[in-house]
Image (cartoon, helix red, strand yellow):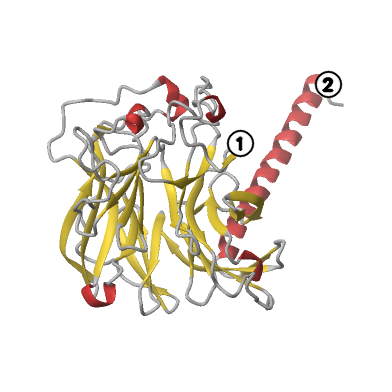
Amino acid sequence: MLNSQDKSASRKNVFTLIICMFMIICTSNDIFAQASRKDTVEIIKSKSGDIKVEHLATLAEPWGMTWLPDNRLLITEKPGRLRIYSKGKLLESVKGLPTVEYHAQGGLLDVKLDPDFIKNNLIYISYSEAAEKQPNIERDEGDLRLGKFNDFSDSVLKGGAVARGKLVGNEIQNLEVIWRQVPKTIGRGHFGGRLLFAPDGKLIITSGERQRSEPAQDLSTNLGKIIRINSDGSIPNDNPFVGSKGVQTEIWSYGNRNPLGVVFHPFTNQLFSHEMGAHHGDELNIILPGKNYGWPIVSNGYHYNLSPIPHHDTQPQYEKPIYYWHPAISPSGLIFYTGKLFKDWYGNALLGSFNSEALVVLNIVSNNVSEEERIWLHRRIRDVIQAPDGSVYLLTDYKEGELIRLSPVKDQNFSKK
């Protein structure tokens, strides 16, 4: 017979065996699920009907994408590669890219075509770059407000940049830098980096505050701002701070934290942007020239170390968001849908979410969000784009990220609202 110690040991062994078997099953299921994503079509539910999810390609940390006139898709990979997706295949990386400072949130970010691309073949890329001369600093000094998100190992002096060049075949030629974040800072993330051409041909750039907070209120820097420049990097004469001394005249708005989505409304031409809050308080804003959006003086969230920040409603002199998320969804990528495949999405905003692992659909009426739907994809969504045929393409935020395509399972009998 077993004594009490033997029985206890036996029970522990059985319990350990059960736990190990459970972990093996869970791990196997996870591996199988990841593998099956690449080989099968998924069907997911939404309010407007079933949606087909197709895995198209696997990429290394994809970040941004844009369509070429011939329906090929340009996709950036954060480690520093620009890929072309064409007819179901990923082609070799485009040559002629700059050296990027790849670390954490930094690397090769967004890509956009010049409005006159058919004539001039110009493309624009945003990325993080290291300073030519590095200070003798072993580590970042950190910030108590960042809590566990301090990265003390990163001591590189760097900042965001935007460059343009001609895409000729599989190579970018005559690459030139047309804009840089100033000043460069030691370590940290929040580069922003989204690019967008306005209806008038001006280039919009989102510039994060590099996890430093206070620069967002400092008009002598372009950190924590929405930027507006001409396509060659010069400053438009009608920018709000042109003629002001000691001010970066490319600034269009300020008090922005880390905007990772920006788009013009297709019917009103209003500029919309969303930005990540700190601990909660992600915002959707209508961006107006010269306006102050309050970061870090006000927020609908609080710092990562849980220290409080006054709410937007307490200081109405700052522009407050038309919508915010608490708890946070960590938004990235932003479009207004104008295609014909998803009739219920027509005119709605679509954005990706890291935390919710979903595509978020917002119905915006008279500058107010009247309804939100989260379409659960169980993936961190980095970017969203509408395809020429009206389907929706997404990039996922992983070391082995995906390019996926969404289309309705059945014809939704499109009719304009």
Which quadrant does the N terminus fall into? top right
Query: Mark 2 is on which residue type?
Result: Asn
Residue 116 occupies quadrant: bottom left
Report the front residue among 14 and 232.
232
| Helix, strand or loop at mark 2 | loop
| Helix, strand or loop at mark 1 | loop
Report the front residue among 144 and 398.
144
Name the residue at 60% across, 64% down.
36
Residue 311 occupies quadrant: top right
Q: Look at mark 2 in the image and give the residue it sits on.
A: 3
Query: Mark 1 is on which residue type?
Result: His
Name the residue at 48% across, 72% down.
387
Please say whether residue 222 is visible from this viewpoint: yes
Q: Look at mark 1 in the image and give the residue it sits on.
A: 326
- Above or below: residue 396 compared with residue 252: below
Pair 2/1: label in front: 1
